[in-house]
Image: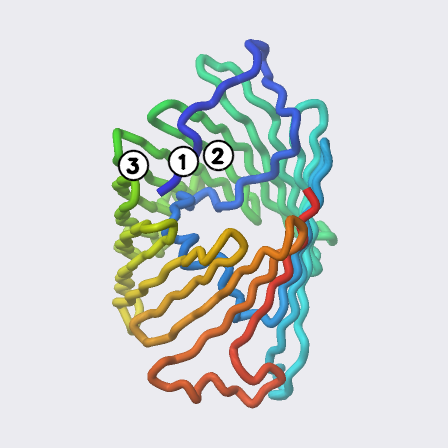
Amino acid sequence: MTSAPSNFTISQTLPVSKITRPVGAPGNKFCQFNLDYARILSDDYVHDKFLTVKYTGKGNLFTVASKGTLNFKLGADKREQPVTSSEVKIVTNIEGRNLETKFNNRGAIRVWGNLGTYSIVKPIIVTSKLKTTNAFKSFSTNLALEYQGKGVNVWTALHLKEGLVPYLDEKMIFRVDRFQFGYAAKLNLTAYTLARYNLFLAYQERDFGVVAEHVSRNKTKIELGKLLLAATYRRAGNDYIAKLSYRPHHNEPYRFKVGGVLNINRETALRFKINNNTKLSLSTKYKYNNNLTVVAGTQVNLLDPASALTNRTIPVPLGFSLQFNYA
């Protein structure tokens, strides 16, 4: 299991420490803990979209990342039609502070900024985010503070959601020897109700780890949400995982998955996962060179292989990803 770095060093004792390279917004949401087991079961499975193209270019003071997808879906007239999506993310470093701007083809705009690290008894990282649309019909924003200590990380944020509804977010992760414990809570400051109450407890050895997690569901009252229990094991450079989930509000409350990542060589990795409904997902990732990585994936029900034949434009669940990287 991984967490945020355990130590944070400021480069000077002035009020603001300078970051000299472009660093974008965190990839995980405020309510998430960035745990390894989740990535093992999600990264590089591309069968649900026919084609994904990613591009990353980096300079000394900027980073540009873009993603485009192509898929085929049934319309209201039951006819298949191509569906595309695209987004562009630009990260710039301006006088030691990072600014990330993100756009997509649906008109969404997100601006995130690292406002610097301030010495307020302890070094505190200050960030802010604004979400809106190209028509400026709606917006949400936040101001967040982050402390990274030796045995604890603390995030606190004040959010203004659509309709100017205020929320107070707090997330903490504690580390004691091989154990980690964390919680994420969101308080609706208008209704004075908990809109989020996520928890996790993890234990990690060198090659073995286990984690239990609770993900809340009800945003107006406290009740049992989704429970997760996962174990990871690393052997000979390969990763294996088993995950059990309990969802009390679903018709199928119990779900089980096993999977793994097999590193065939330095350029090739094979991913697999299968759930309790015998759906097997496969993915192969091949690094052609430093600039191009290709991913291909598919899915099949082992008890009903014929169900994979869809008689559509793409006759079986099949997806490809081209990842261009010019760092």
| Earlier-in-chain disc, 3 versus 2 | 2
Res. 14 image quadrant: top right
SS of the residue under disc 2: strand
Q: CA distance from mark 3 to mark 2?
A: 22 Å
The label number, if any, that marks residue 133 in the structure image? none
Res. 179 image quadrant: top left
Residue under the point 32% across and 51% down: 235
Q: Which residue is mark 1?
A: 170
Residue depth check, mark 3 versus mark 1: number of the one nearer the observer: 3
**What quarter of the picture does the C terminus occupy?**
top right
Image coordinates of residue 97 in percent, x first then y, are 65, 27
Query: Is 320 above or below relative to 238?
Result: below
Q: Residues within 10 Å of mark 3 (few under 14, many from 20)?
A: many
Query: Is 104 above or below relative to 82?
Result: above
- The answer to whether mark 1 and mark 2 are in CB contact below 8 A is yes
Q: Nearer the viewer, residue 306 or 69?
A: 306
Image coordinates of residue 277 in percent, x first then y, are 32, 76
Query: Is 245 above or below relative to 100?
Result: below
The amino acid at mark 1 is Glu
The amino acid at mark 2 is Ala
The label number, if any, that marks residue 157 in the structure image? 2
Image coordinates of residue 145 in percent, x first then y, are 49, 28
Residue under the point 70% across and 40% down: 58
**What quarter of the picture does the N terminus occupy?**
top left
The amino acid at mark 3 is Gln
Q: CA distance from mark 3 to mark 1?
A: 17 Å
In this view, the residue farthest toward the front is 265
Q: Which residue is mark 3?
A: 180
SS of the residue under disc 1: strand
| Earlier-in-chain disc, 1 versus 2 | 2
